Image (cartoon, grey):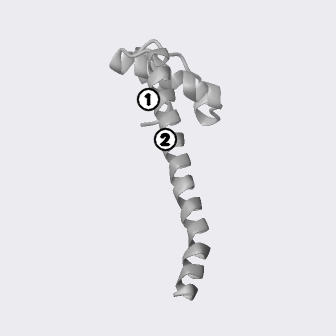
Amino acid sequence: MTVVDVIASLDAWGITVSQEQLSRPTQDFVEALYCACLRQAAQLDHNLLKGPVQELLDSSQIEEKVINIHVSAAANLCPFFRICTRLL
């Protein structure tokens, strides 16, 4: 698709964009365009997804912290096991 085709397709959905916005998109533009397409294609409002997405991100951070705790614990046990093997 050409830029003109993309602009025409988005315009058919009632989403007005310029060639400049497409060639040099900002973060705000991309987010707004994504939300508008999400609303058009799936009848979803991005505000409805904020809670579940944040919960998912929070849970992934918890899992990462748990993994870090296990790695740290294993690293701390290595010297202990070396000492124990010397005593045997």
Q: Position of residue 51 (x, y in %)?
A: 48, 21
What residue sits 52% from the left and 57% below the top? 70
* Residue 10 in view, yes or no: no
- Between circles 2 and 1, the one closer to the viewer is 2
Q: Secondary structure at mark 2?
A: helix
Along the line of sight, which residue is nearer the eye, 62 or 74? 74
Furthest toward the front, the residue is 87
The kind of residue tagged 1 is Asp
Residue 80 position (above or below residue 40): below
Q: Position of residue 79 (x, y in %)?
A: 61, 75
Q: Position of residue 33 (x, y in %)?
A: 52, 23
The kind of residue tagged 2 is Ser
Residue 48 position (above or below residue 31): above
Task: Check the picture and name the quadrant holding the N terminus.
Answer: top left
* For the residues bearing labels 2 and 1, Cβ distance under 8 angstroms: no
Where does label 1 land, which residue? Answer: 5
What residue sits 60% from the left and 25% below the top? 29
Furthest toward the top, the residue is 14
Along the line of sight, which residue is nearer the eye, 49 or 59? 59
Residue neighbourhood size for the residue with mark 1, other residues' Cα within 10 Å, grouped as few (<14), some (14–19), many (≥20)? few
Residue neighbourhood size for the residue with mark 2, other residues' Cα within 10 Å, grouped as few (<14), some (14–19), many (≥20)? few
